[in-house]
Amino acid sequence: MSTRIAFLKGHGTENDFVIVPDPDNVIDLSPAAVAALCDRRAGIGGDGVLHVVRSAAHPEAKELAAEAEWFMDYRNGDGSIAEMCGNGVRVFARYLQHAGHVAEGDLTVATRGGVKRVHIAKAASVSGSAAGDITVGMGRARLPEGDVTVSVGEHSWPARNVNMGNPHAVAFVDDLADAGDLYAAPPFSPASAYPDGVNVEFVVDRGPRHVAMRVHERGSGETRSCGTGACAVAVATARRDGTDPAVTGTPSTYTVDVPGGTLVITERPDGEIEMTGPAVIVAEGEIDAKWLESAAG
Ligand SMILES: N[C@@H](CCC[C@H](N)C(=O)O)C(=O)O
């Protein structure tokens, strides 16, 4: 490993990531190293890490190399691995554009949840200062059967199971404040419902086809946004509202406010879901490899 490791910092609706470009997959990103990087006081700080690797150089993505040149090796802030990160893909694409690997327009990104189609919209200003939104094709949701209850303090709510490649429990609440401080993962029952943990979304109505949510993410705690979570919320809300596109035959679009901004989610009658929102690179620099080695213990 060289003595300096390049990194960038980016976010999508304030779901923030430490980006580690490593085309040849030579950096040892242990779970402890990821947690050290994401530490908001002793490290750089982030909800997760986007390890940017050429698909051909990663054992989990080699087979996807013909379809997507780059693999998003996503890690949660505690170092755990997740199947998918929706905002992560959008920020990953912005990094590829920023680094000159891709231009505006269409591209593909390999993830543990399969190959995702991405569209980088044209910048809104000629100076390029107002970057265009980024849309990602998130694939189809799965809606596993089963009643789940989510609790916070004295409150408990029925929750809808939605799998966006990763697991989500969506609870409709009267007031987002009822979810409390969300320092700890909200307990759910039955305890066997999510053997690998779950991301929990709390949702209120804001208007026609417009909701707001808070989220507690598995492996990261409460975050300011979650892309897969916003998609899970749009899917659950469409079923609640009777606007399931598979039934109505027309696309269903929801605006989902998160604490860090707004995402727009469209589900088509064939079940394919697209998510659109901003993605920004805010800084770049170098990490001392010796610090990372000692911080990771
Ligand atoms: N913030 C992400 C989701 C990241 C993964 C999640 N914490 C999990 O463990 O499933 C998003 O934007 O989708």
Image: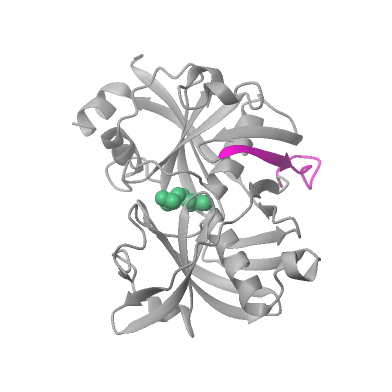
Residue 99 versus residue 74 in the image, above or below: above
Q: Is residue 264 magenta?
A: no
Q: Residue at x 34, y 42 (%)?
A: 80
Say which quarter of the image contains residue 44.
top left
Residue 267, visible in the rendered structure: yes
Which residue is located at x 52 percent, y 74 percent?
203
Which residue of the protein is positioned furthest toward the top in this rendering? 2
Of residues 5 and 197, the one nearer the viewer is 197
- Where are the magenta residues, as a range? 114-130
- Image point (73%, 41%), residue name: 119
Residue 20 placement, left or right of 67: left
Q: How is the image coloured?
A: one colour
Residue 16 image point, x, y percent: 47, 48
Verify whether residue 127 appears in magenta: yes
Q: Residue 145 location, x and y as percent?
A: 49, 66
- The quadrant of the rendering that contains the N terminus is top left
Answer with the quarter of the image where residue 269 lies: bottom right
Q: Examine the rendered structure and indicate whether residue 168 appears above or below residue 281.
A: below
